[in-house]
Structure formats: structure tokens, C-alpha cells
Amino acid sequence: MEIYCTRPQCPRPQNHFVDLDDNATLRTAQQKYCSACGMPLILAGRYLPIKLLGRGGFGAAFLSRDRYTPGMRECVVKQFLPATDLNPTQRRLAQDLFEREAIVLEEIGSQHDQIPDLFAFFPVLAAGLKSKQQEQFFYLVQEYIDGENLEEELVRRGEFSESEILFVMRSILPVLQFVHDKNIIHRDIKPSNIMRHVNGKLFLLDFGAVKQVTNSPTGAGKSSTGIYSLGFAPPEQMSGGQVFPSTDLYALAVTIVLLLTGQKDTSKLFDAYSNEIKWRDKVNISFDVAEILDKMLRSAPNQRFPSAEEVLIALDESAQSMPDTSISYHQPQAISQPVPPPLPKPSTASSSAVPAFSTLELLAGSAFSGFEGALISIAFLSLFNSPPVTFIVCAVVLGILIFAQTRRWIEKWDLAIIPAISLLVMFFLNSLRGGLAIQEIMILSLAASLTAVALTSLFRLIYKALSSII
């Protein structure tokens, strides 16, 4: 079995133990130590790190197994790992944040099924790597969410549709309402802290930056500690002032805007002159939803929605004013209810529908059709020497090719391979029959291809203009 050493400076963290391949032996084995640095590997006597999931902020995370559970349950072991250049005060603050995450997870993780459960929190003492002085490491163990976070998903598949961001909002807003009802502000909502399980359910992660707030209306004396993610924090958080439930709503709105626009951060969206995020001209969503997001993004906390529940109510009202889409998560939902089912398919298509074409795919397809249409026309004109017959045959063949594209039977590399083969056939036939030179064929085909692209672009612009007016 492979066990991963959690010491940050370990030169060879992977360790293999043949005797631990047997589960019966694994459950009773004595402590194992890293062959490279001597670090204890079986944490708290039961947790076995097997893979590094990532490092960042104040810690590192490891996929681990709990040998004291019947199924060797997978879990996440998070290690407190502050930067080495922190002064004592900063280090103490970082450790407090790490311990705070354990406290919050213990308090609320078991009460909501979209927040990971806390399993353990403990220190580990180990001999120093370069000296005999002992080092102390802190760990917390939490539920493992098998999936990918929304930041990873955005990189992998690109921008989200309106229906998909509504699913995210309706999944996370009830979690925020639950957290805020506990007088807790998350303070670090962003795509990387929202995890989608393989079954579709969304989880809110990383409660290390949470802030306890008072029950008083003003929250006097309770200021932010300055822990935030740049671009997601509203003005009151960045200035170190008091934080509110609407502070989290602002960060959630930024997250949604990034998912809609496909941007990794707000640097390309932020307008310094107006001190606002300008995003509406870059997406195509309903007016009501855009208005809700803009209200969540207002600079002054008292101009935003006061609670996550108010945002949910606004979404319900906007959904009622729109045509019925038969999408389950558009229906009103109680705040305490669990997340809806995995991402539904758009209601306008059946489960077997072909995915929508992107602009790039549309233009590539038109270029293919124009190029291939020119080749087919030249070939049949030289064969039949009759323009009417050539026109009819070409229209039928080209229609079949376009239909095949709409069904995605022809796509991607097919759009280059088929014209290349056709061009080779034309070269061979013309060399036998003494028709047009290959240079002439290429020029005519490219001209037809560019014409098709230009016409497609023109009709697309006219369609968008008419859609916005109607």
C-alpha cells in the first residue's frame, strides 16, 4: 500500500509497504515512518494519507483512508501549513483560522448535508527534519466529497448557461441561509470552494475564514480580520469593516458572474472608473435574473439583499413571470430542504437532443460546407456538363452533409479530413480528364468557404439583433 508523507519538506513523500496490502494486517499494523524523513505516516493511529490533493492558503489537503471503519472510508486530511515568512502574530492568526474551521464544521457539518462533516482534529509531534528539535503539525479530518469544484469545472467545460447558474444559486443560497441563521459569515465564497459531487449535489467548503457575528442589528465592534479572496470580497470586507450576510451574497454573485462569462477572475470585468463589475453585455440571460445579480453586487451592504432567503424569493418571483420551463430547480424550495437532483437538461430538448453549437463550431461548419460545396460543384459540372443537373445533385449532397453536421455525425476533425480527401480525389480526376488546375480549384473552394462564413456571420448578427428587439 502507498502512504503519502505529510511533512512539507519531505524529499520523497511516497512510501510503499507490502505488508499493508492486506486489509486484516492494515487494521492492526503498528506505526509506520517515512523512509526519507522519519515522519509518522499513520496519523492519530488511524488515518492513512494516500494522495496529495493540493496546497494553498494555510494548509495542504490529502486524500486519506480511515483504517478503523469497515469499508476503509475515504476522507480528507487537512494539514495546517502556514507560510514560513509569517511573524508570530500572523502565525497565531493563521492557526486560529485553522482551528476555527474545525470548530465550525463540528457545529454545523452534521446539521446540513451540503457541508462536509468533521471527523477529527488533532496535533502530531515529529522529530525535526534537520534538527533533533520536535516539530508540531495540526490536522483536521473531514468528509471527502468525490467530484470537482466549480473552478475546475469552468476550466474544463467553459462558461455556464443561465439554467446552470440558477441551479448553483438555488443549491448554495439555502446553505448560506442556514449558516447565516447560525450567526456565521463564510467570507470566502468562490468557485473553488463550491464542490460538485459526482451525483450532482453541490457542497460549500472551506470554513477556515468564517466570522462569528453578534445578534445586534449594528454588529458594533465586530470587524473583519482582513482574510478574503481578492476580487470576491466587497468593499466592507476589504477595508476591514463589519461583515454581513450580504457580504457572502456579494461573493456568490461574483462567483455566478465568472461562471456565466467564463472568466477566471474579475480583472477583465472590473471597471475602475465606476468601481463596479461590468458583465451584463458579455452574457445573454433574462433581465430579471440579471437585475437580481446586480443588486447582490452593489457596493453598499444595505443596498443588497439582506439575506439569502430574500434572493430565493426574488428568484421565485422572476421564475413565475417567465414561461414554464419544467426544470425542477425552478420550483420554489424550502430553505432547509436538500439540494435538488443533478443538473437537469434544458427543457427545450429531449434527453437524446444534440448539444447546442458554439459560435466557433457554427463558423467551422459553414466553412466546411462552402469548401465542400465548391468541390462537389466543380466535380459534377465536369462530369455532367449540365448546370441544372449539377445544381440539383449538389443541393442534395450538400443538404445531406449539413444535416449530418446538425446531428453531429460530422464534427471536429471530420471537417478537415473530408475536404482533404475530396481535394485529393479532385486532383486525381482532373489529372486524368485535364480539367481545371488544382490551384484554380483551391482558389474557388476557399472563396466559397469564406463566402459561406461571411453569410453565416451576417445572418447570425441579424438573428441576434431581431431577438433582442422582439
Image: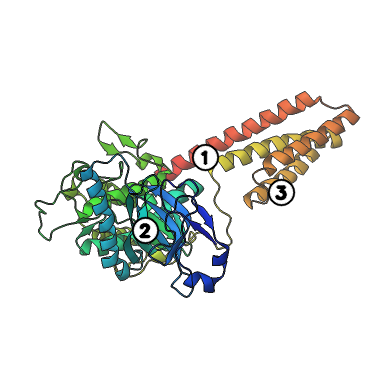
**In front here: 441 or 17?**
17
Identify the mark nearer the N-term, 2 or 3: 2
Side of 431 relative to 460 (left or right): right
Side of 89 relative to 449 (left or right): left
Residue 323 seen in the current view: no
The amino acid type of the residue labelled 2 equals Met
Question: Residue sitting at 58 percent across and 32 percent down?
Answer: 454
**Residue 461: horizontal and vertical position, in percent?**
49, 37
Identify the mark nearer the N-term, 1 or 2: 2
**In front here: 261 or 88?**
88
Q: Up-down: is 330 above or below 271?
A: below
Give the distance between the C-alpha atoms of the residues marked 2 and 3, in whole angstroms.
37 Å
The amino acid type of the residue labelled 3 equals Ile
**Residue 142: horizontal and vertical position, in percent?**
37, 63
Q: Up-down: is 40 above or below 388?
A: below
The amino acid type of the residue labelled 1 equals Arg
Q: In the rendered structure, are the residues bearing label 1 and label 3 in contact, judged by CB atoms less than 8 Å apart?
A: no
Disc marking residue 460: 1
Q: Residue furthest right?
A: 432
Which residue is labeled 3 in the image? Answer: 400
At mark 3, the secondary structure is: helix
Asked where in the image residue 234 lies, by quadrant, the reply is: top left
Mark 1 crowd level (few <14, some 14–19, many ≥20, 10 Å Cα) = some
Mark 2 crowd level (few <14, some 14–19, many ≥20, 10 Å Cα) = few
Question: Residue sitting at 80 percent across and 40 percent down?
Answer: 389
Q: Up-down: is 297 above or below 454?
A: below
**In front here: 122 or 73?**
122
Which residue is labeled 2 in the image? Answer: 322
Asked where in the image residue 371 lies, by quadrant, the reply is: top right
Give the distance between the C-alpha atoms of the residues marked 1 and 3, in whole angstroms.
22 Å
At mark 2, the secondary structure is: loop
